[in-house]
Image: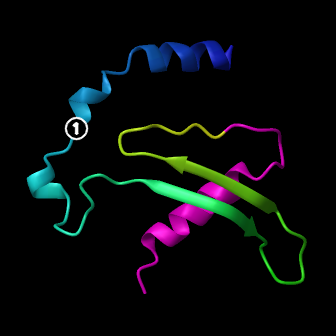
Amino acid sequence: MVSVERLHEFHELPPEEAFKLDQDKSIGKDWPLNPSIAVKDLTVRYRTCLPVCIDGLSFAVGAGERLGVVGRTGSGKSSMVSLFLHHAFDRT
């Protein structure tokens, strides 16, 4: 029943166009106008003594494209997303 409730909630959401940001006020001048992400042969492990959790991942996402991450339990979805979020906010 929870999945039916969730589908109903998503159905009631307003279209994404209603949430567009005013680029002049919210995005810095250094933000790319045509952003893209390219990953080639990414290999990740949590520590040097642990086994690899992501091995040989390659993909590209162009400006304006959307990316869905799907896979079995333990396939590295959360690890990949947390890696990108960590590096996106690590500006040291």
The verdict on residue 64 being magenta is no
Q: Which residue is mark 1?
A: 20
Residue 65 spot, x, y in % from top left? 42, 38
Left or right: where 57 falls relative to 37: right
Query: In the visual, does 48 lie left or right of 77?
Result: right
Residue type at the position of mark 1? Lys
Q: Residue at x 36, y 39 (%)?
A: 64
Indicate whether residue 75 is drawn in magenta. Answer: yes
Residue 84, percent from left and from top:
55, 62
Q: Position of residue 6 (x, y in %)?
A: 56, 20
Quadrant (top left/top right/bottom left/bottom right) for the N terminus: top right
Q: Which part of the image, by quadrant, shows the C terminus? A: bottom left
Asked if residue 92 is positioned above or below residue 90 in the image, the reply reads: below
Crowd band around label 1 with a 10 angstrom C-alpha radius: few (<14), some (14–19), many (20+)? few
Look at the image and give the residue range highlighted in magenta.
70-92
The answer to whether residue 78 is left or right of residue 35 is right
Residue at 43% over, 45% down: 62
Q: Is residue 50 left or right of residue 24?
A: right
Q: How many marks?
A: 1
> Camera-side residue: 54 or 8?
54
Instruction: Give SS at disc 1.
Output: loop
